[in-house]
Image (cartoon, coloured by chain):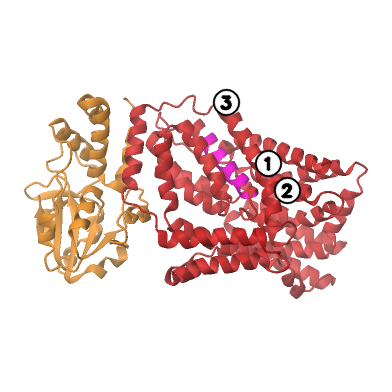
Amino acid sequence: MSDPTLGHSFLAAAGELGMCSAAWLFARTLGDDGGPAMVAEARDQLGRDFPVFDAVCARYLAGEREPRVDPTPVRAALAGVDRVLVIGVETTFLDAAVAALDCEIGLLTYGELEVDWPRVLANYGGRVAPCELPAFQRYAGSRGALLTFLYGAQAAVAHVDPAWLRVVAGDVRTQFRELIGWEVLGGEMYVYPRWLVQAPLVDFSWVIR
Amino acid sequence: MSAALACAAIMLVALIGQALRPQHRLLIVTGGAGAACLVSALAGTATTGALLAAVPWDVLVMLIALGLLSELLVESRLFGALAVLSTRRTQADPRRLMVLFAVGMYLISGLVNNLTAILIVLPILLRLYKLLGVTQRFLSWSLGLLLVACNLGGAATPIGDFPAILLLGQGRMQFTDYLVAAAPPTAVALALLIAIVMVVVRPTRDLDDGPVRRRLTIAVIVALYRNVRLDLRRLVPAGLALAAMIVAWMTVPPTVVGPELICWLGVGAALAVAPRDGERLLRTRIEMDGALFLLALFVMVGAVSKAGAFAAIARWLTELPVPAPLQLALFLVLAAVLTGLFSAGPSMAGLLEVAAALAARMSPTAVYVGLALAVCAGSSLFLTAATSGPMAQIMTERAGLRDPQGRTISFGFFQFMPTGLLAFAVILAVGVGYAMLLVAA
């Protein structure tokens, strides 16, 4: 199993699927093939570089086989909202949200990793519109919201996609009805979270765990 | 004759200049075209109006229209669906992927232009290779084979690439005649190349791809395209238009309705089915830089032609004291080498007049299809000989592939060279041999 290029494969998948969604996909596929031993081996190999993968493997080894995805609280948080801009990609969660929501949905087409945005968007059949960074305020207003994914939210802080910090500043908070953070990892990370940045939870009007 | 030499020198300098400084390509060739017009006007060989009137606008219309049709096919997500299908069918086995993508590229580039074909296929393949983990040796041969397959596919049909479109647009060959004559030798050349690469070179021999890695690759590719569906609103009109155009090209006499008009109307109809998208494509997706490059090229070739240079070369060739088939063979080798140095567009545009002189003395099919194959061989010689080569280089650099030792894998001039030399030899041998067969028949 020792394979130095596995990390590049994971990164290639994580760019478009999201760190958490890609990690679950890898953990399940490895587990189906070689059982928990292979997941543990992959965790040893990649965990230090990809803390989200490390955390997901830990959950897999603890007996979980898929992430908990419940868009109901997201729907509740978006009550009265006409349009929401999603920042960061986590396809397992975004797929569920898109199916559950009936408002206009945009996706910020900005990321640190290599992403084929037209392909990402093609999976939503026109339900999710692309939005470039300079145009994010098109979603602002009393009926507009921002949604991002949280990784290992603790008492006061969580880790988020770096794109979140490109959008959210003090004066931006007041331009949106809601700023929603949706916890996707379901537990803390054991390794310092490379690829993500820290954000205070007070920045969010809703934190969905 | 001095005007001919001056115009030829201008064209040569412009072509070498654009090859050496691709970042200033358009500036150099349009400047060269302007200078050629000036020399022609001062020498009295042709006015600028006459040179512009001699530009084969029908060919430019076809190139632009077929480019738009390619865009429609791309936006229909057809190629994403094919990517998932091919990954599943090959079980992400690098050997089978390599062959399947080469054959697939050959078929695709027979319908869409080479640059578009590369832009469609390469991102998918590079993503697959990144997921699989490949070596430098495998990548060099695999992408090299893909580029050569792209060139061969472009030469296989009359609408695949500029040289064949030029033959069709200028009425040198009919659609069906070209297809029937060119498709078999290009397919033979591809089969030979694949066989040599897979059996003799064996680029997968140092590849360490286990079944787990393959299953991961399939899982990721399926996830990336999990909800991507074919956009029938775009695919059906584009497919129907293409089918109708092919039927019309094969049945309508070109003296009644020319191939360019069939193309114009067919693509126009496909775009008009969804007018908003059609208008957007027309406004934003026409490859103006490619059209401008060819326009400048045609003007320079026209200036050289009006000054009598090509007629002189044709005379020299046809007066060589060797049998006519040998004259043709020499011409094809010359065309292949010139294409390797100057790329397909310039050499095809320049040599077509010389080919016409040879076609008057022997089978035109042998001469024109032989020329198309020779140009294809030349396009495959160096990475820089075809526009899709540098594009593949840039896309591979961006993909940031690494080998099992963590070293960056690249695809540049020298990595392509072994495949290029092999392809050049195989395609040229097939082309010359095929032309000789046709002449003898």
Residue drawn where x is 55% and y is 59% of the image: B242
Quarter of image, res B176:
bottom right
Display colour for chain B: red
| Direction left: furthest residue | A155
Q: Chain of mark 1?
A: B
Identify the hue of chain A.
orange
Give the overall secondary structure of the magenta segment: helix
Residue B107 at x, y percent in the picture:
55, 46
Please rate how many residues cluster around mark 1, counting C-alpha atoms within 10 Å: few if below 14, some from 14 to 19, many from 20: many
Q: Secondary structure at mark 2?
A: helix
Q: Specify the amino acid type for callout 3.
A: Val
Q: Which residue is mark 2?
A: B369
Residue B374 lies, in percent from the top left, at 72, 45
Q: Which numbered disc, 3 or 1, marks the residue closer to the eye?
A: 1
Q: Let me know if marks 3 and 1 both belong to one chain.
A: yes
Q: Quadrant of the C terminus of chain B?
A: top right
Which stretch appears magenta?
B141-155
Q: Residues within 10 Å of mark 2 (few under 14, many from 20)?
A: many
Q: CA distance from mark 3 to mark 1?
A: 21 Å
What residue is disc 3 on?
B199
Q: Give the mark, 3 or 2, whose residue is nearer the N terminus.
A: 3
In this view of the protein, which residue sits in the foreground, B201 or B174? B174
